[in-house]
Structure formats: C-alpha cells, structure tokens
Image: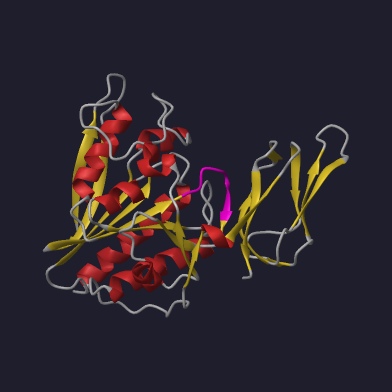
Amino acid sequence: MKKDILFTVSSYFRDDMNIMAYRFGKGEKTCAVVGALRGDEVQQLYVCARLVAFLREVEKAGGIQPGKSVMVVPTAIGASMNEGSRLWEPENMDINRRFPGDLTGSTTERIAGALLERLKHYRYGVQLTSFYQPGSFIPHVRMMDTGRQNPELGCEFGLPYVYVRAPRNYDQTTLNYAWQLCGTQAYSLYAGKTREIDEAAADQTLRAIVRFLNSRGVIRSETAPGHPSTIITNADMISVSATSAGLLRRIKFAGAHVRRGEQLAFIINPCDGSVREVLKAPVTGMLFFMQDGPFITEHSPVFQVLAGA
C-alpha cells in the first residue's frame, strides 16, 4: 500500500487540508473508489476505510493481479466532516455539484478539478454517494444516462438493482457525469444510510466492490455470490410526495413491498397531534427510498416506489 497526497488545500487559520489516497498494486490505472464528498457522508467514509483495510490484506497475500492497480480516496472534504456539515463550510457549496471543476476557480471548484484530474485516467470508477435528501435507499448501483454508460457491467457488483437515471441540469455537475465524459466507466453505489453507520449495508456494499474487482480481474479474493441484477430507469420509479408539512410518522420502510392504496405514513400536526395527511402507495411495488427526517415540508418527496417489484 502506498499513501499519497492527491492535493492540498491551504488555510490561513488552521493546518492545510491534505486529500489522501491509498494505492494498491502497480501498472495500469484500473479502478478508483471515491468516498465522502459531503461532510455528513459517514457511511461512505466507513465503507472506504474498510475497503482500504481489506485491500491491504489482499496485497500482502499477493492478491492484486499483476499490472493492475486500485486507488481509494476515502474523503475529499475532511474539514467539513470534522464539523458534521454536509456542505463545504467556507462557501456553503456541495463539492459533488462542482464538477468538472476549475483549477483556477473557487476552493470547491479547485477541489473538484484537482480530484477529477487524478481520477480521469482510470478505466473504472466507483463513487460511494448519498441522496440530496436525508433517507434510506435499497442498496443499488446508479449511473447517469450520458450515452456512454454500461449498465450491463454494473450488474457485476451483484446488487439487486442497477438504476440508469436520466440526468437533470444539476446532475451534469456531479462526479459520476463528469467521470463518464472522461471515458471512465463510472458507477455510484448507494450504501444504505448516510449520517450513521449501517453495518449490514456496509457489508453488502463492501462485498459488491470486492465482487466487481474480482470480476474485472483486478484482485483474487473469495467473496459470496451476488444477486442477479435488474436494470431499471426513471420510468420504473414513482414518487410519493407530501402536500402538507408536519411531523412524519412512517409505518412502512425502505425495502417493504406494498400494495396500491396501502398506507405508508402520516403527516402529523406538530402542535395538536391531528393527522394532516395520510400518504398511500400509488402503485403496487417496493419502497426503494424513504425520507427519514422527523419533519417534512410541503411538496417534498417522502418515498420512491419501484413499480411492480
């Protein structure tokens, strides 16, 4: 294992922030794995830490294939992680909305630009990321529809679903989108929780990455077989939004199979306890995403239902 400083962010008021990477093997730039780009992505950081520990043992045992290399970047936003802030504090900006970056721009643009410069020559890219809303997903592989994506290759992670998402304007400034345009086969893994550690989801995500590295001939390591993957798109997903604001009391959770018309949650008046709204399943399917904050605002999505699952 080699530990590198990818780049350094200078500071007038505290020690410089170094963005660290851990490299395994020698030869072609085969696969890069990126963890937390937001300061609350604790689960993503944790999975990367476990991956570094795992690959260190694999390398000691001679399990990195000759001519292949893997790089792991656990986080690019260390200062904000110290403060538990999702955004880059000095600018109040989301680094995963600043790609492809600008080496002469603002701090977040320089971080994004420098990171992409070091990542763009890798054949495969894996990003552990989170949704813009707090919540829980069914672990899955996701990629942007850039015309360059390869969802069939995403099935090699062995997760139940590979989600090809039509990008909106703001999605075109994410690492996944920019990485694909650089010629890398890029995949985003949603690893369950964000702000807290979910051991079961972390295990599943780590096994998925190991399974992919095995399949691509990067490492030799035993791992359990994965799921046969189903490729899904935006057309398969139905959003359930609240028309009222209030306390959110869920009675169904991510992964549950529901029937059309089945009750999912109640929106409660936070002052008198009355029920303002009952959220029901619009279709029969599986709850793919669940918002898990205690409050909900008007017109905010609470669930995403994978129709027919």
* Residue extending furthest toward the top: 12
Q: Is residue 134 above or below residue 104?
A: below
What are the residue bounds of the magenta stretch? 130-136
The image quarter containing residue 38 is top left
As drawn, 281 above or below 103: below
Q: Left of 272 or right of it: where is 105?
A: left
Camera-side residue: 189 or 11?
189
Q: Do we see residue 17 in this rendering?
A: no
**Can you say which quadrant of the picture contains the C terminus?**
bottom right
- Work out whether residue 80 or residue 15 is closer to the camera in this orientation and state it: 80
| Residue 168 in the image: above or below residue 28 | above
- From the top left corner, tell me how far across and down residue 296 is, in percent: 69, 39
Check the picture and name the quadrant holding the N terminus.
bottom left
Residue 10: image location, x then y, percent: 24, 26
The answer to whether residue 131 is magenta is yes
Q: Main secondary structure of the magenta part?
A: loop
Q: Is residue 285 visible?
A: yes
Between 227 and 24, the one lying in front of the other is 227
Residue at x 37%, y 33% (from the top left corner): 79
Q: Is residue 139 magenta?
A: no
Figure colour scheme? secondary structure
Q: Is residue 116 left or right of residue 226?
A: left
